[in-house]
Amino acid sequence: MTDDNLTNEYPLNSQDAQNLAKHSVKVKQKERNIRKQRKKLNRWKTFLRIVVFGVLLFFIYQFIKLPGWYLKQDAFSKPDGITVEVVNNKIVPTSIVYKSLKDIKIRKIPIFMMSVKPIKKELFKIPVFKYIYVRRYGFPARIQIIVRERIPSAVIKTNLKDKPVAFATTDGILITNRNYMSLAEIPSALKILVKNPDFKRDWTIKRIEQIEKIVKDVEMYSSEKVKYIDMRNPNDVYVRIETTSVRLGVLDNTVTERIKRIYTILPQINDIDEQVKYIDLSWDKVNYIKLEQESK
């Protein structure tokens, strides 16, 4: 039952009506005051948010301006090994890496905003590198360059004691730059001895792959590891295995069939008291054991 119905059923006297009106006015005033207080509170909350946000931005800005976020301007031109660190390079000397980066310009921006693309672009000009990852650090700002080099499958030398003059990688790349040869000696890589190699004409990846196949055939039929293959005289090729040397002669289309005869003649070496110089497989259907005393 509403107030109107009550008023109709029980008519209010003037005093009650006056009291009811005053009560309604007080309720309206309270509601108005509550709304005003809410508005003030919301304004204060908004103001405090703005202040807090502004203070936060200020501290972030000051934090970013700290010197520890910025790479030294001469980090690449005058490397110290700490500001720019090179990791996992075994073939390419660190000095060559630094030399490749010396012309890179360093922008005056925090290290985490610095682009690593120019670094990778320069380093990928070095054919030995297969993968490059650049990691950035702050306080102090520094860079770590993590590289993964191609693996040599065969090294080309003019003498066993000399440094390689070139090497082929497992993924089919021929490296001939002398700057990358000082650390290219890997025990698992095949050693190929040559005389005055011409890398523009004679020596290609395809030719090296053919030689590697011949070496694998020698290892398969001899059951011994090949130490090196001597091709300084291309018409009289020798392969050195663990037990002795094998003379292959010319590497023509009969060489594979000649290599297959190794397993029949190699066991005979154990029955010979004299020192063996090499096994001769250079002839198509003739093979024999050459002794050291026969050369005297």
Image: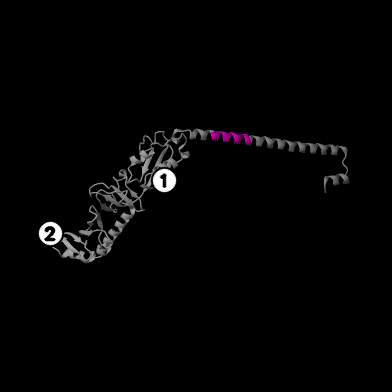
Query: Can you say which quadrant of the picture contains the C terminus?
Result: bottom left
Q: State how far apart marks 2 and 1 are (Cα).
A: 59 Å
Apparent side of residue 220 relative to residue 148 in the rendered image (left or right): left
Q: Nearer the viewer, residue 16 or 8?
A: 8
| Lower sequence index among marks 2 and 1 | 1
Apparent side of residue 96 relative to residue 241 in the rendered image (left or right): right
Q: Position of residue 121 (x, y in %)?
A: 42, 43
Say whether residue 48 is magenta: yes
Q: Nearer the viewer, residue 214 or 255?
A: 255
Apparent side of residue 175 relative to residue 24 in the rendered image (left or right): left
Magenta region, residue range: 46-57
**Label 1 belongs to which residue?**
133
Say whether residue 237 is magenta: no
Q: Quadrant of residue 123?
A: top left
At x 82%, y 47%, the residue is: 2
Q: Position of residue 158 (x, y in %)?
A: 24, 49
Q: Position of residue 24 (x, y in %)?
A: 79, 38
Q: Main secondary structure of the magenta part?
A: helix
Q: Position of residue 157 (x, y in %)?
A: 26, 49
Q: Residue furthest front?
A: 201
Q: In the rendered structure, are the residues bearing label 2 and label 1 in contact, judged by CB atoms less than 8 Å apart?
A: no
At x 31%, y 43%, the residue is: 179
Q: Which mark is residue 195?
A: none
Q: Quadrant of residue 19?
A: top right
**Label 2 belongs to which residue?**
294
Can the viewer see residue 256 in this picture? yes
Label 2 sits on a secondary structure element that is helix
Q: Residue furthest left?
A: 296
Amino acid type of the residue tagged 1 in the rendering: Tyr
